């Protein structure tokens, strides 16, 4: 299969034809150059896949991966997610004005009826999708060297005729409300609205993925602040400030100066309270205790590595933290054959095949590689990219995740394993989705690079 006007590094063992076919299937188009015409990319290929639908986080990450080659994907993703943006307070769907959705399924979706017993769709239970949407909008305007998309007309879920600039303003307002809510300590925080909602409303969204060093799960009735989303929020505040000022729109209730002040405050708090000097990394999260204290969840994980890909660790004052974090991520307890483990082998709940407690995810490792590269750790970044490609070539596909075994070859789970803990069934291992979208787009992004 010929890739029009695009050159891929084909010396890596990756099946290029399969890569292109899967991209087209994810984008619901016949030809690669049509990507974006079919709307945002769905999260997973294959009609029988659990994730064969629109996921906000996945769609945004995939659009960022493809932005340079296929800006139409970013455009379609921004518009569709703005069209479905929250317009009301609706706890069953975790909907709030300005919030960008987590997941959307139609009535004929084979999994929708089961999930719909607990949620309404669109379901908005994610805190990272809104800043990610802002960041994609900023990146799209930079890539196209134009603000024209801000005038794009849409009709929102309340049947109002608005523009994408209006969507930006309400997204920023949602972010500010979270940051300024006293229950969240000044951070972007998570707390589900009902007992049926997703407890961990970030990319590591399985129920056992956030815990303290002794293995005790966080108290999901209280707010907590995950580390990686603070970097997303920081970038979103700065990026939105720039777009708002460049739009030359006057009389707004949100101004760039205030957004930059909030960003600076968030950065100061994150550097001061998340960093764990003895661990050489940032805490996975901060919890807010009944006595008012902030308690770090001292679990060594991949998620702090995402800060390197944000602007939060830029500057001379963070240089020593960057150096230590970059080195820590490449230590043997985190670095596996296929990439960075979601949790260190020293973590209380580590298991090599666990969904978010020891497996390695190509997109997660890829974001860390991006961050390492932007701070000059080029050899380390190239090593991570190489491990992603080698692992995908070895299994002959683009799986959701790999096992985090301490061995010299990549492998994936083949069976589902459940354990009963305190009388509750907990899924500790499961096979990955075979053709996961953000694995596909990450492989594309690596192959498109001259370093590949």
Image: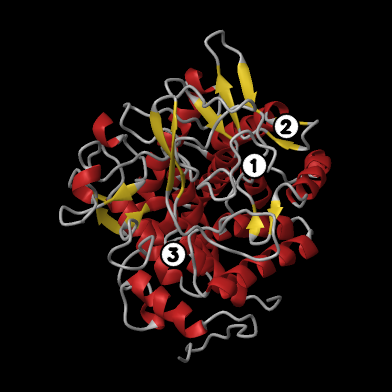
Lower position in the chain sequence, tag 3 or tag 1: 1
Residue 380 spot, x, y in % from top left: 77, 61
Q: Mark 1 points at which residue?
A: 301
Q: What element carries label 3?
A: helix
Q: Is 98 placed left or right of 144 in the picture? A: left
Q: Residue 275 carries which label?
A: 2
In which quadrant will I find the N terminus?
A: bottom left
Q: How far apart are marks 2 and 1 (CA)?
A: 13 Å
Residue 303 spot, x, y in % from top left: 61, 44
Tag 2 and tag 3, C-beta contact below 8 Å? no
Q: Name the residue under label 3.
A: 437
Lower position in the chain sequence, tag 2 or tag 1: 2
Residue 424 spot, x, y in % from top left: 39, 29
Q: Which mark lies nearer to you, 2 or 1?
A: 1
**Is 403 in front, or is 247?**
403
Q: What element carries label 2?
A: strand
Residue 97 spot, x, y in % from top left: 31, 36
Q: Is 106 placed left or right of 324 in the picture? A: left
Q: Is mark 1 on a helix, strand or loop?
A: loop
Residue 3 against residue 220 in the figure, above or below: below
Q: Quadrant of residue 433?
A: bottom left
């Amino acid at each position: 299969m010929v890739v029009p006007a695009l050159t891929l590094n084909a010396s890596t063992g990756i099946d290029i034809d399969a890569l292109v076919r899967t991209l087209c299937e994810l984008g619901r188009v016949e030809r690669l150059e049509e990507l974006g015409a079919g709307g945002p990319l769905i999260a997973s290929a294959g009609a029988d896949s659990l994730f064969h639908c629109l996921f906000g986080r996945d769609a945004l990450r995939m659009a960022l991966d493809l932005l340079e080659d296929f800006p139409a994907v970013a455009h379609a993703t921004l518009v569709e997610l703005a069209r479905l943006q929250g317009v009301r307070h609706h706890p069953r769907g975790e909907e709030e004005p300005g919030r960008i959705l987590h997941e959307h399924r139609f009535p004929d979706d084979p999994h929708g009826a089961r999930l719909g017993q607990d949620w309404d769709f669109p379901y908005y239970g994610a805190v990272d999708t809104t800043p990610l949407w802002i960041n994609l909008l900023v990146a799209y305007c930079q890539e196209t060297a134009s603000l024209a998309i801000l005038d794009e007309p849409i009709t929102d879920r309340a049947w109002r005729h608005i523009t994408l600039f209006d969507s930006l303003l309400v997204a920023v307002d949602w972010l500010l409300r979270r940051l300024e809510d006293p229950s969240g300590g000044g951070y972007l925080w998570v707390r589900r609205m009902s007992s049926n909602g997703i407890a961990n409303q970030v990319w590591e969204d399985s129920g056992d993925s956030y815990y303290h060093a002794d293995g005790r799960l966080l108290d999901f009735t209280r707010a907590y602040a995950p580390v990686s989303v603070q970097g997303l929020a920081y970038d979103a505040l700065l990026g939105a400030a720039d777009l708002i000022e460049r739009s030359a729109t006057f009389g707004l209730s949100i101004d760039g100066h205030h957004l930059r002040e909030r960003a600076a405050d968030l950065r100061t708090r994150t550097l001061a309270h998340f960093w764990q000097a003895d661990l050489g990394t940032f805490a996975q999260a901060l919890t807010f205790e009944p006595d008012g204290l902030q308690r770090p969840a001292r679990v060594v994980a991949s998620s702090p590595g995402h800060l390197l890909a944000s602007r939060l660790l830029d500057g001379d004052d963070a240089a020593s933290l960057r150096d230590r974090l970059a080195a820590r991520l490449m230590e043997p307890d985190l670095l596996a054959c296929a990439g960075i483990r979601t949790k260190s082998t020293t973590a209380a709940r580590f298991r090599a095949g666990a969904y978010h407690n020891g497996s390695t995810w190509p997109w997660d490792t890829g974001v860390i590689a991006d961050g390492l590269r932007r701070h000059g750790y080029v050899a380390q970044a190239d090593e991570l990219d190489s491990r992603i490609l080698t692992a995908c070539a070895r299994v002959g596909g683009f799986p959701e995740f790999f096992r985090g075994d301490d061995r010299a070859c990549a492998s994936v789970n083949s069976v589902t394993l459940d354990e009963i803990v305190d009388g509750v069934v907990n899924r500790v291992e499961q096979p990955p989705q075979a053709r996961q979208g953000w694995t596909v787009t990450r492989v594309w992004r690596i192959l498109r690079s001259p370093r590949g």
